[in-house]
Each structure stands twice: as C-alpha cells, then as structure tokens.
Amino acid sequence: MTEFTDSLAESFHGDVTTVRNDKFHRYELLVNGEIAVISQFMDRPGHIDFMHTETREKFKGRGLARVLARFALDDVVASGKRIIPHCPYIAAYLRKHEGYELDVDWPAEPPVGEPGNE
C-alpha cells in the first residue's frame, strides 16, 4: 500500500491522507481516517486502467477528488506504467492538467459522461 499526505489538502479541515489499496483495487482519500473518495482501477501488465471515481456525499464540493486524482496519476507514472482513463472524472482531469500526455493511452471510445459519449 502506498501512502501520502498531500500538501494541497492542508486547506481542508481534518487529517487528509491518500493511499493505494491494492486489496480492493482502488486509490482512497481519507479524512480523519474515513474514506471520502475512491478511484477504482484495474492493474494490468504495463498499465493501470481507471474505471470509476466516487466522492461520498458528505465530502462533495471540497476538491478532494482532484487531490486523489493527482496522487493516483502521479503514482502510476512513478511506477512506469501507462494510464488508461475509462473513468470520466480521471479523463476530465487529464484533459485539464498538463504533464501526463506522454503517459496516457486514450481508450478508443471516450468514457461515458465525457463529451462525445454522453
């Protein structure tokens, strides 16, 4: 399990921690030890396929999913694997943030919820 405390999360009240939970195939962002955001993935040879990102209702609107997305994507890049964004949130994050272009293999069909595949 990879763990990291994000300095961007300092503006949030409480203890914010990000982890890669291989047992459940997801990245997690915890606030005071409670799961606030998850990003589910499939770990394949040579790449990580992001499937779904979800923020629990009481944690929405705080930018926590963005913090988790950055942690997860940076973790994949550091591992030397490729990113495949089937998750609409991760796909949207990648389109808005530079620096991952060389590490992404876009799926043939855009994720459901992305422009062009709604």
Image (tube, rainbow, N blue to C red):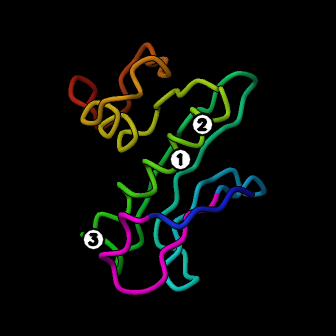
Q: Amino acid at mark 2?
A: Val
Alpha-carbon span between mark 2 and mark 1 = 6 Å
Q: Is residue 101 left or right of residue 21?
A: left
In the picture as drawn, the residue positioned furthest to the top comes out as 108
- Comparing 102 with 60, the one in front is 102
**Is residue 16 found inside the magenta-colored segment of the image?**
yes
Locate residue 33: give its quadrant. Answer: bottom right
Q: Are marks 2 and 1 in contact (CB under 8 Å)?
A: yes
* Residue at the disc numbered 2: 76
Q: Secondary structure at mark 3?
A: loop
- Which quarter of the rendering shows the N terminus? bottom right
Residue placed furthest toward the left? 115
Q: Is residue 41 above or below residue 12?
A: above
Q: CA distance from mark 1 to mark 3?
A: 18 Å
Q: Are marks 2 and 3 in contact (CB under 8 Å)?
A: no
Residue to which mark 3 is pinned: 62
Three-letter residue code for mark 1: Ala
Bounds of the magenta span? 7-19
Q: Please name the residue shown 46% across and 63% down the image.
A: 6
Q: How many numbered dots are placed on residues in this image?
A: 3
Residue shown at the point (33%, 78%) measured from the top left: 12
Image coords of residue 74 (percent x, y): 52, 41
